[in-house]
Image (cartoon, rainbow, N blue to C red):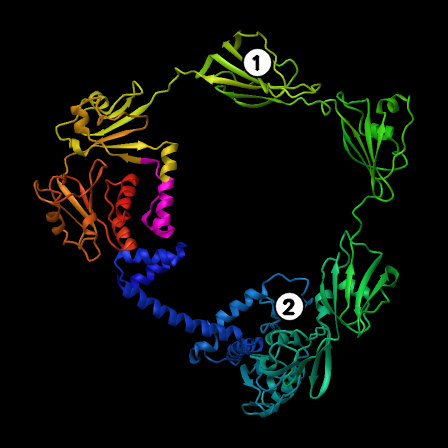
């Protein structure tokens, strides 16, 4: 195998979930060499180490470095687009992030998508969301208050007697140069102001079109803004002149772990021009404070003043940044308010007083005046898991369930009537009332339910959480079940009913099967004596019956069953279903045949099939048999033994598994020559006899130089056939070679093996290196070998 083939094979194996050992063994069996695998592994290890070092360096980079690189790439692309540069004149890396940067960005994006937890600060991730960039829309109409500056493109349209369009970019000193007119100063003018100035100036050269002049903004300029303070990546950023404070915070990576969202400041020419509270935007959608930035502006994010945590039964428990003077009521509003099961009367506040912790219990009347402090932890408890007015009725009433304790429903009689009264099977002698005391312990009161309903006993007042239980007569009796097994259509467990007879149960179970015995039906009964005071030697009773048409004809007629009786309908000993065997290949009448007797043999079936044809190779006839459960269990044990010997990975490579079909070694010649003899084996259901045509070849496999298939030559020994395969390989176990015959038999080579070689057989030479030779043998597995043959081969290989 070439190096590229090996690498491709490894990739496919890893995708299929194979381990490295399995892949290596498969590669050896496919022709790869050990030296080749070691060399490729060394190359792979070197490249992996370099990649991990690069990745570690990448991942170890600070958030500031990552965001700075991201912003630089994005801004370079935007600058080129805004200034109208030709994309073909630019390096593609100015517009697209490099593959390495993309990988870093993807890793970071995956982290951002993680679910927000209670230990996060509310709102802090708003500038880390990929789809919320606050990027300005450069295609919108120019705002009326937009101030022109160097880099902006001014478009002047003139129509009427004179028609022309003038496009000019404002120079760094604030002028545009109009042909035949000269420089016009527009710096720091709004678009409306610039329109008036240009109309006045253009009248000098376009007098006939003085009223037909329109001034609009073309390509907009970029500005440089400094973002300072507690942000992930502080620094200078080149942005669109439409950009706002929020966009500047986004490109700088958002606020850091100690940055404030409530007190973002904008400084312009040394003066503070705005203060932003991001919570106003998140909570109320207020964005008017998100002012448009100008060239040279400084956005400053100070450290937070207060960080308070609220937990428990609120809709959004997490940390919140609070301004000085804000109260618990404001904190609850930020947290979305109480959840449905919250206890709203009080909240507890754990506070750090500089020396130790203290606890404050804040009543609901003080929520709006109790001010929070940095480090506070506010806890909202849940309501009690109990009811204020709950009643419950259970058991033999028409509508058991939960009811409300009220002025019209507060006695036992009223509760039963509310549940639509008693069922017919209600036990009216006594009911039970479970009551909860004030100390939350339980007590039980007996209730004369019949007397209360008839008026002969006083009604009982109810309290909250009372549970009235009215039993059914069936609840007080152990009616049990009856079971029926064996040859009935629906064996299983059935509900006992009074006066249920054996015939009733048989009919209920769908009647007897065709295979049922009518002369043997057994009933097993448990011993019950509730009044006994001594141990009994008898542990059960048994009854036997004869049936006809499902009715008892011998034994006690109308035998009445008791709870927990078990009925066994036996299978008739003379009942047998057809047992089919199959004959294929070179016989006169191939097909399926029914076995006449349990001891029907191989020669008998071949005779019924008309005997073998003139083209049959009788010695190659094989028998395929369906394994029964005992045989399957034995094969499982063999597989487990092989796993311990060569490992589970090697067993997987070899494809060794328990197969329900296996080959039985037979000698049809001897069977036909001596019917009823030892070679004439007894057949069983599912057997398949395959009589092949004559095959005049011999296969050579295993630890040979070139596995081969050669013509059979009578009288030649094993060495002749090995020479046709190039002889032994270096790792061959020469003294342990064996032969697999077409009929599934296996024999160890004795001496020269001249008399052992037959047409259609296979010579296998085991190897000294278990992994490679097993894989080689299996990769060239003969069509004759089944699991049984494979196990025999493995036994020979591991004998020493």
Q: Which mark is residue 125?
A: 2
Left or right: residue 225 compared with residue 519: right
Segment colored magenta = 636-661
Asked if the magenta segment contains residue 270, the reply would be: no
For residue 635, which quarter of the picture? Answer: top left
For residue 228, which quarter of the picture? Answer: bottom right
Disc nearest the viewer among 2 and 1: 1
Secondary structure, magenta segment, majority class? helix
Q: First in sequence: mark 2 or mark 1?
A: 2
Residue 192 location (% of width, % of height): 67, 81
Q: Which mark is residue 434?
A: none
Q: Residue at x 70, y 84 (%)?
A: 267
- Quadrant of the image for the N terminus? bottom left
Residue 697 location (% of width, % of height): 14, 42
Label 1: which residue? 502
- Relative to residue 36, is residue 274 depicted above or below? below
- Relative to residue 404, is residue 497 depicted above or below? above
């Amino acid at each position: 195998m070439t190096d590229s083939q090996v690498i491709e094979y490894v990739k496919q194996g890893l995708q299929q979930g194979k381990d490295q050992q399995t892949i290596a063994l498969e590669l050896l069996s496919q022709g790869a060499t050990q030296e080749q695998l070691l060399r490729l592994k060394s190359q792979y290890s070197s490249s992996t180490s370099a990649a991990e070092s690069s990745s570690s360096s990448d991942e170890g980079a600070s958030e500031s470095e990552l965001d700075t690189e991201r912003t630089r790439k994005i801004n370079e692309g935007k600058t080129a687009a805004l200034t109208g540069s030709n994309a073909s004149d630019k390096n593609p890396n100015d517009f697209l992030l490099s593959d390495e940067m993309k990988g870093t960005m993807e890793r970071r994006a995956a982290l951002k998508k993680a679910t927000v937890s209670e230990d996060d600060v509310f709102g802090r991730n708003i500038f880390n969301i990929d789809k919320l960039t606050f990027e300005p829309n450069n295609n919108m109409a120019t705002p009326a208050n937009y101030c022109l500056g160097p880099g902006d493109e001014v478009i002047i349209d003139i129509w009427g007697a004179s028609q022309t369009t003038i496009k000019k970019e404002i120079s760094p000193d604030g002028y545009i140069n109009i042909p035949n007119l000269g420089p016009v100063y527009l710096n720091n003018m709004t678009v409306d102001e610039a329109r008036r100035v240009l109309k006045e100036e253009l009248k000098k050269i376009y007098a006939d079109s003085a009223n037909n002049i329109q001034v609009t903004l073309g390509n907009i300029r970029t500005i440089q803004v400094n973002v300072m303070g507690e942000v992930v990546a502080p620094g200078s950023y080149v942005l669109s002149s439409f950009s706002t404070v929020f966009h500047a915070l986004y490109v700088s990576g958002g606020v850091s772990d100690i940055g404030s969202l409530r007190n973002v400041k904008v400084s312009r020419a040394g003066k503070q021009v705005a203060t932003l509270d991001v919570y106003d935007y998140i909570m109320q959608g207020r964005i008017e404070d998100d002012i448009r930035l100008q060239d040279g502006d400084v956005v400053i994010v100070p450290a937070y003043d207060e960080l308070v945590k609220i937990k428990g039964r609120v809709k959004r428990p997490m940390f919140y940044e609070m301004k000085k003077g804000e109260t618990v009521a404001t904190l609850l509003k930020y947290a979305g308010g109480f959840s449905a099961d919250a206890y709203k009367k009080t909240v507890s506040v754990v506070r750090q007083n500089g020396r130790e912790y203290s606890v404050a219990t804040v009543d609901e009347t003080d929520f709006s005046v109790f001010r929070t402090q940095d480090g506070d932890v506010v806890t909202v408890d849940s309501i009690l898991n109990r009811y204020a007015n709950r009643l419950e009725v259970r058991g033999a009433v028409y509508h058991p369930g939960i009811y409300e304790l009220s002025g019209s429903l507060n006695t036992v009689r009223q509760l039963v009537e509310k549940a639509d009264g008693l069922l017919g099977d209600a036990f009216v002698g006594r009911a039970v009332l479970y009551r909860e005391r004030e100390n939350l312990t339980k007590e039980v009161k007996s209730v004369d339910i019949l007397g209360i309903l008839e008026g002969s006993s006083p009604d009982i007042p109810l309290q909250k959480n009372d549970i009235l239980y009215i039993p059914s007569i069936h609840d007080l009796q152990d009616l049990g079940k009856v079971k029926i097994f064996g040859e009935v259509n629906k064996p299983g467990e059935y509900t006992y009913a009074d006066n249920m007879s054996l015939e009733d149960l048989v009919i209920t179970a769908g009647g007897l099967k065709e295979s049922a015995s009518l002369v043997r039906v057994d009933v097993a009964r448990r011993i019950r004596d509730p009044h006994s005071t001594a141990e009994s030697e008898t542990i059960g009773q048994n009854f036997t019956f004869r049936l006809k048409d499902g009715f008892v004809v011998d034994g006690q007629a109308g035998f009445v069953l008791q709870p927990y009786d078990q009925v066994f309908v036996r299978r008739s000993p003379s009942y047998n279903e057809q047992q089919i065997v199959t004959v294929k290949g070179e016989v006169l009448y191939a097909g399926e045949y029914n076995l006449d007797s349990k001891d029907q043999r191989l020669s008998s079936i071949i005779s019924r099939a008309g005997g073998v044809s003139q083209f049959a190779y009788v010695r190659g006839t094989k028998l395929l048999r369906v394994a029964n459960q005992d045989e399957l269990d034995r094969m499982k044990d063999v597989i487990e033994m092989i796993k311990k010997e060569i490992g589970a990975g090697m067993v997987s490579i070899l494809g060794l598994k328990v197969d329900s079909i296996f080959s039985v070694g037979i000698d049809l010649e001897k069977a036909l020559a001596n019917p009823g003899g030892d070679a004439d084996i007894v057949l069983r259901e599912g057997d398949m006899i395959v009589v092949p045509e004559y095959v005049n070849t011999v296969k050579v496999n295993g630890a040979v130089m070139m596995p081969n298939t050669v013509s059979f030559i009578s009288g030649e020994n094993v060495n002749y056939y090995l020479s046709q395969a190039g002889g032994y390989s270096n790792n061959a176990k020469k003294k342990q070679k064996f032969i697999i015959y077409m009929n599934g038999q296996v024999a160890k080579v004795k001496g020269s093996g001249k008399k052992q070689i037959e047409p259609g057989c296979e010579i296998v030479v085991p190897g000294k290196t278990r992994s490679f030779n097993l894989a080689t043998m299996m990769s060239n597995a003969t069509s004759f070998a089944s699991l049984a043959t494979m196990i025999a081969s493995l036994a020979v290989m591991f004998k020493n």
